[in-house]
Image (cartoon, rainbow, N blue to C red):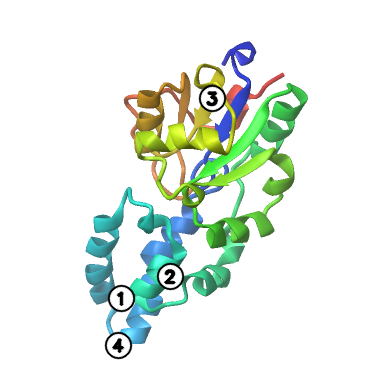
Amino acid sequence: MDWNEIDSVFLDMDGTLLDLHFDNHFWLEHVPQRYAEKHGLSRQQALDKLIPLFKSMEGTIDWYCVDYWTKELELDIALLKEEIKHLIQVHPFVIEFLKNLAKAGKRRVLVTNAHQKSLNLKMNNTPLSGLLDSIISAHQLGIPKEEVNFWEQLSSLETYDPQRTLLIDDNLSALASAKEYGIRHLLAIYKPDSKADIKKVDSFQAIHSFKEIMPE
């Protein structure tokens, strides 16, 4: 990584700075369990109903919306997330990386699809907010990072030069849309979820740990 070519570093949250295990456990274990309890179903019956519903919304702004799922599932999603907040974990070397970016004079911008209620929960249970220069949710623009237009609209909230910006994200669709828009420096994450297998990444350079790209 040639840090002389980069002014701004855009950082995804879930799966990039934070362990995606929290979110995977939440949607594949915790929500199905609570849904099953509410409707008198087995866990498998709940999964059989929920998984197609989740997949139908992937890549849309509603997929990331706490209020949408609260209404759709008739469950208090924000409250359910609070129940397992002990699982929220920062990935290794993230804190050191963010501190070193500041020392190197780079702008640190969190750019996440997460809903404000999820964002608040994560910020309140990690030290990240004090290590970022700006925090932006896609819900402020009403479109997810998977859409090319997002990166153009982002300039209304954050002034940046795409040619001198690095985006680090575990979402390959978000990386693809950023590339199409013209963001020059792109990095994926091999292991968003510490409890899952290494992710297959073919079309982008990727890192196992922030230690690999630590600014001096």
Q: Which residue is mark 1?
A: 43
**Distance in Å between CA atoms under marks 4 and 2:** 15 Å
Which badge, 2 or 1, is on the more N-terminal residue? 2
Residue kind at label 3, given as amino acid type? Leu
Element at label 1:
helix
Q: Which residue is mark 2?
A: 30
Any mark on residue 166, and which? 3
Q: Which residue is mark 4?
A: 40
Residue kind at label 4, given as amino acid type? Gly
- Residue at (33% x, 51% y) in the render: 60
- x and y percent of residue 156 in the render? 54, 36
Any mark on residue 70, and which? none
Element at label 2:
helix
Which badge, 4 or 3, is on the more N-terminal residue? 4
Q: Is residue 100 above or below residue 50?
A: above
**Distance in Å between CA atoms under marks 4 and 3:** 48 Å
Q: Is the Cβ of the residue at disc 4 closer than 8 Å to that at disc 1? A: no
The quarter of the displayed image where residue 147 is located: top left
